Amino acid sequence: MRKYFPYFLKYKKALWFAPLLVVVDVICEIVQPELMSKIVDQGVKQKSLHYIFQTGGIMVGLSIVAIAANIGNIYYSSHASVGFAAELRKGLFNKIQEFSFSNLDKFSSSSLTTRITNDVNILQEVIMMSLRLLIRAPLMLLFAVIIAVRINAGLASVIAVAIPVLAISIYIILRRGLPFFEMMQKKLDKVNAVIQENLVNVRVVKSFVREDFEMKKFGASNDELREIAIKASGMVVLIMPVMQLVMNISIVAIVWFGGNKIISGTFQVGQLMSFITYITQILMSLMMLSMTIMTFSRAQASSERILEVLNTEVDIADSAIAIEKNIPVKKGKVIFENVFFKYHPDSPEFVLKDINLTIQSGETIAIIGATGSAKSTLVELIPRLYDVTKGRITVDDTDVRDYTLQNLRSGISLVLQQNELFSGTIKQNLKWGKPNASDDEIINAAKDAQAHDFIMSFPKQYETVLGQSGVNVSGGQKQRLCIARAILRKPSILILDDSTSAIDTATESRIRTSVSSHLHGTTIIIIAQRISSIQSANKIIVLDDGAIIGNGTHDELIKTNAVYQEIYYSQELKEPAAL
Ligand SMILES: Nc1ncnc2c1ncn2[C@@H]1O[C@H](COP(=O)(O)OP(=O)(O)OP(=O)(O)O)[C@@H](O)[C@H]1O
Ligand SMILES: [Mg+2]
């Protein structure tokens, strides 16, 4: 609960006012039956119109105050709950921005979306309900019991029987119903996951003509949710008839005992009337309480899911040394020293094994190796998308962990293997990594990435609006835009992870030439599948199953490295014997 305090801070006033107004409302309401009984027992009996008007006037006045208090309560409780939800959504969103890659590996994006939207909404409802009912119900219950006992302690013994009977029945019903509510939340999560995954991959679904399969999958999880929801509400609807039954039996008992007392002259009609009203209020309050408890337990599951995100320890953050040093990346010299890495601490094997590698500033090095040989993993360690498990990586002779993430990552542009664009114009997308870039800089970067010509062929040129994920450009065009976005930042280290896979060899070679001539002094690391893409690199690293098994120029490797030879000849379509 303490974790949520900061999100309430702005709404402290509302948090005080809402319950205060509930107290006013309850007081005004609770005296109404008492006044009513006075009108009947005194005003009507003594035929005093004056008394009836006076007391009636007070009743109307109190009702008006109660209505005003109620409106005020609704205003403040919605203000607080809606505001809290907005702050919490913001908090969750910001937290996710801080997440490291390994943090992100733990949550699916659909689950994060459900948490930020649906789960927060459930908490919002609970807070709204708490501010309206949580104080009202027990307060009403307390006052009504006190007054009922004061009117007639003997008759009030009916309550002493009715309350436990009702409380026990509600308890039994809720106990059986609550597990269903928890299950309901989980099923809802599953439905959301199916929807979201389907929407993200809707093009794949269509191209594989798997709509039927997807519909069945959705239907199945939707049905599961329905079944559980029906069971859960089936339990809850039981509360209503049970309450009605207890209430009616109590009223009959009160009328019976009360009637006898009236006949014997020790009780009055008005008193009996108000007594019945108080009994009704008591039982209603109990029901309100049970509803609140139910909503609370439903929210418990949502709250846990939200706290799981908020409590996630961000494993990659700025160290104290980094903040104190606050140095930028200048030259771009990279050294791997006995680096070992695995994604999960408990997985038996390392993904990268004893990597030792020196990349001088301004050098262009290439990494080649079979799929799954950990090429992407290796480069992702440089900007600390993941942290090494053992060993260390230095940039300009400083451990990467001694840079602030801001400084380290602004010095490095990484074009990821799976890169995305945002919805917006081409210009906005290119400027995204460097908001203050001038038009000339943007055009030059686009020219270097061989993107300028196709951008100019669009009617709106740099103002062309890209759809979500940039669906209206081709795969190769998208890759070139991503490269342009990366080089616009003029990084000290540029890493291209298989970023030219969808670009023809001639264009790729032009990109290489213009990038290396314009980004003078930038260290360039290229991962590529085609040997033709990397042949001219100063140094080529051959990775095999997470270990470096070759390090040299093309001419050296082609003579000495069996894996390199194999890749080379398979691409050249030549037999090794032809060497
Ligand atoms: N986020 C992750 N969590 C756990 N394991 C991962 C993760 N990413 C990659 N791996 C595993 O690490 C190994 C190396 O993967 P990596 O992506 O670095 O290979 P790669 O050489 O870049 O392959 P490709 O040429 O297909 O891009 C693979 O066995 C892969 O299954
Ligand atoms: Mg890869």
Image: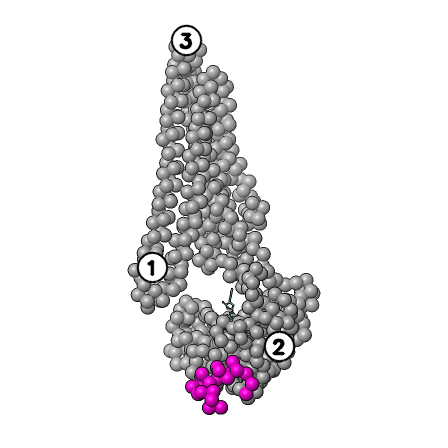
Q: Earlier in the sequence, mark 2 or mark 3?
A: 3
| Label 2 environment density (alpha carbons within 10 Å; few <14, some 14–19, many ≥20) | some
In the rendered image of this protein, does residue 127 appear above or below residue 537? above
Q: Is residue 384 left or right of residue 235?
A: right
Of the numbered discs 1 and 2, the one sitting upstream in the chain is: 1
Q: Which residue is mark 3?
A: 264
Question: What is the quadrant of residue 336 in the picture?
Answer: bottom right
**Mark 2 close to ligand 1, CB under 8 Å:** no
Residue drawn at x 49%, y 71% as measured from the top left: 372
Q: Secondary structure at mark 2?
A: strand
* Residue 44 occupies quadrant: top left
Of the two numbered discs 1 and 2 in the rendering, the one whose residue sits closer to the viewer: 2
Q: Please state which amino acid type lies under the numbered disc 2.
A: Leu
**Whole-number angstrom distance, CA of label 1 to CA of label 3:** 75 Å
Quadrant location of the N terminus in the rendered image: top right
577 falls in the magenta region: yes
The residue lying toward the viewer, choosing from 563 and 220, is 563
The number of discs equals 3
Look at discs 1 and 3 and give the one toward the viewer.
Answer: 1
Mark 2 = which residue?
357
Residue 444 falls left or right of residue 362: left
Give the residue drawn at x 58%, y 56%.
313
* Helix, strand or loop for disc 1: helix
Judged left or right of residue 293, residue 207 is left
- The main secondary structure of the magenta stretch is helix
Q: Which residue is mark 1?
A: 214
Is residue 328 in view?
no
Q: Secondary structure at mark 3?
A: loop
Extent of the magenta region: 559-579
Q: Amino acid at mark 1?
A: Glu
Q: Position of residue 221 (x, y in %)?
A: 36, 52
